[in-house]
Amino acid sequence: MTLTVNTPATTQTPAMNPLRKGLRMERTPQPCVMVIFGATGDLTHRKLIPALYNLALEHLLPEGFSMVGFARRPWDDKVFQETALESVNKFSRRRPVQPSVWEQFVKGIRYVSSDFNNPEGYKKLAETLDAIDKERGTQGNRLFYLSTNPSDYETIVENLGQAGLAKPQSSSTTEAWTRIIVEKPFGHDLKTAQELNDVIGRAFRENQIYRIDHYLGKETVQNLLVFRFANGIFEPIWNRQYVDHIQMVVSEELGVEGRGPYYDTSGTIRDMVQNHMMQLLSLVCMEPPINYEANAIRDEKTKVLRAIKPLDSDEVVERTVRGQYGPGTIFGKPVPGYRQEERVDPNSITDTFVAMKLFIDNWRWAGVPIYLRTGKRLPKRTSEISLQFKPAPQQLFGSSGVPLEPNVLVLQIQPNEGISLKFGAKVPGQTMNIRPVTMDFRFGQSFGVAAADAYERLILDAMLGDSTLFARRDEVEQAWAIVTSIIDGWKLHMPPAFPNYEAGTWGPKEADELIERDGRQWRRL
C-alpha cells in the first residue's frame, strides 16, 4: 500500500501554528567565506566541496560566497581549484558540472598552505580573508570547518583565537559573524569531551560552535519533528501506555575501509552509538518543545539523555553485547575478518558490533525498553527506528489460534528514506483471515524530488545561524556519560572470544539472546 501525498491549494501560515515560531522560511544566508581546515582530505572532497557546489547550483549560496582551503600540502589556488572540480565531477549528486555555475563558483576558491601549528599560516589566512572581504563583499562573515584529524582540533582552535580570527569582525555598517563547525568524534570519552569543550569555549562562545552530526541532516530525521508534532494522530499514543518497545538499528555491510588506525582506537560504540544513535534516540523520545527554535528543541533532547542513567558494572553485563566480525561473505564475495583488515592490530579487542538495552526514566517512557543494534560487516546497509505497539486489549479475532502480528511504525533513514506503518487487515473471502499489511511513504516517490545530501542542509544551516540540527555542549557530554559508563564496565570484564560473529551475519548470538530473554525479537530487515 502506498501513501499518496496531496498538496492543498492553501497552506497553513506560521501564525496558525505556535510550534513554528522562529521557523526560518528564507534560506539565503548573508555573504560569507567558508574556511576548510583539512582541505586536501577525503571528507572535504567527497562531501564538503560537492555540497557547496550543489548549493550554488540551486542558488542557495549568497552572492560573493568564497571558500578557502587550509592544509599542509604545498598547493596553490589553481591546484586546489582543479582538485575541487575533480571532486564535484566524481562525487556530486548533480553532475556533470554546469559550466556557467562552476565559472562563478570557482572565482571564490582560494588556498593557504600551512602546518596547523604554524602561526604564520594563520596570519596569511587573515590576510587572505581580508582580501576576499574587499574583492567579493563577504562583509567579514566567516565559517570555519574542522575537517581534520581530531588530534588537530585544539591546535587549530587555539591558533584561531591567538590570531584574532575567532572573534566576529565589525565594520562601520554591519556586525559580522564568525562560526566554527566541529566534526565528530567530539572527544574519546566524557573527560576528553569536556576538555575539548573547554578549549573551544575559550576561543568561541557556545552560540558560535556547531558540532555536526550528518545523520541529523537526513530528511527522515528532520521529518521526525514534523511527523510527531504537526500531526494529531500519533503523539497521543507515543508513550509507555501504548508502545511496547523501541528498536533502533544502524547496520553497514562495509568494513573499516582503510580507517584501521582510527577505528581500532574508537570502535562502534564511539563511532556510532555516542553520536548518531544517541541523537536519534533523543529526537524520537523527546517531549514537545515550546517552539521551533534551536535551544527549545535541544533542551528537550538533553532532558531525554539526562533521564538515561549511566549503567553500573552489573548492568553493563546484563544489558550490553559487543562483537567483532571474523571472515565471511558479503553479497557472495569473501571478505576478511576485522583483525585481518589493513593497519589493524591482529590481536585487537575493538568492538565492531554493539547491542544494548536502555531505559528512559521519565513519565512518558518509564518501563519501555529501547534496544539499540549497530555494527559493521552485517548483511545490508540500513538505518531505521521502529516503534512496536502493544496488542489490542481483547483479541476478538484470535479464535484461529494464530497470534496477530503487532502494529509497527518504522522510520527508515537509509538507504531509502520514508515511513511505514504495519497493521492487520482482513483477507478477502468467507473466513476471518487477518494478514499484516504495510502502508508506505517514500520521500522520493511522493514528492518527486531527490533528497539533498545531509551536508548541504547542515552547511547551509550553519551559514544561516540555525543550530537546531547541531549538538549543544550539554547534549554531547550527557551522551558521553552514558557511553563512558558502558566502556568502563567493559574494562572490568574479560572481552568475548573475538571474533564472535561471521561477516555477513546479523552479529553474535548473544545479541539475539539479549532481546529474546524479554520475549521479543529483532525486527526482520
Image (cartoon, rainbow, N blue to C red):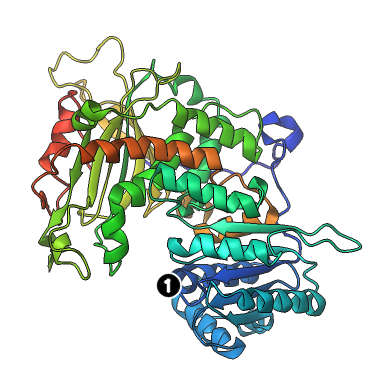
Q: Residue furthest top?
A: 394
Residue 466: x, y in percent?
Answer: 66, 49
Please say whether residue 392 is visible from this viewpoint.
yes
Please give the count of numbered marks on the rendered protein. 1
Q: Which of 190 and 135 lies nearest the eye of the viewer?
A: 190
Q: Residue drawn at (43%, 48%), measured in percent from left and top?
A: 192
Residue 333: x, y in percent?
Answer: 13, 68
| Residue 197 drawn above or below residue 160 | above
Q: Residue drawn at (61%, 49%), measured in percent from left and top?
A: 201
| Tag 1: amino acid | Asp
Residue 490: x, y in percent?
Answer: 22, 39
Q: Quadrant of residue 391?
A: top left
Q: Which of 431 and 309 lies nearest the eye of the viewer?
A: 309
Image quarter where the C terminus lies is top left
Q: Quadrant of residue 513?
A: top left
Query: In this rendering, would 225 be left or right of 251?
Result: right
| Residue 291 drawn above or below residue 322 | above
Q: Which of 90 and 17 lies nearest the eye of the viewer?
A: 90
Residue carrying label 1:
42
Q: Which of 307 and 291 lies nearest the eye of the viewer?
A: 307
Residue 352: x, y in percent?
Answer: 23, 52
Callout 1 crowding tier (Cα within 10 Å): few <14, some 14–19, many ≥20 = few
| Residue 508 drawn above or below residue 358 | below
Q: Residue furthest left?
A: 497
Image quarter where the N terminus lies is top left
Query: In this rendering, would 77 be left or right of 453?
Result: right
Q: Residue drawn at (47%, 40%), measured in percent from left and top?
A: 477
Mark 1 falls on what kind of element? helix
Q: Quadrant of residue 163?
A: bottom right
Please say whether residue 251 is visible from this viewpoint.
no
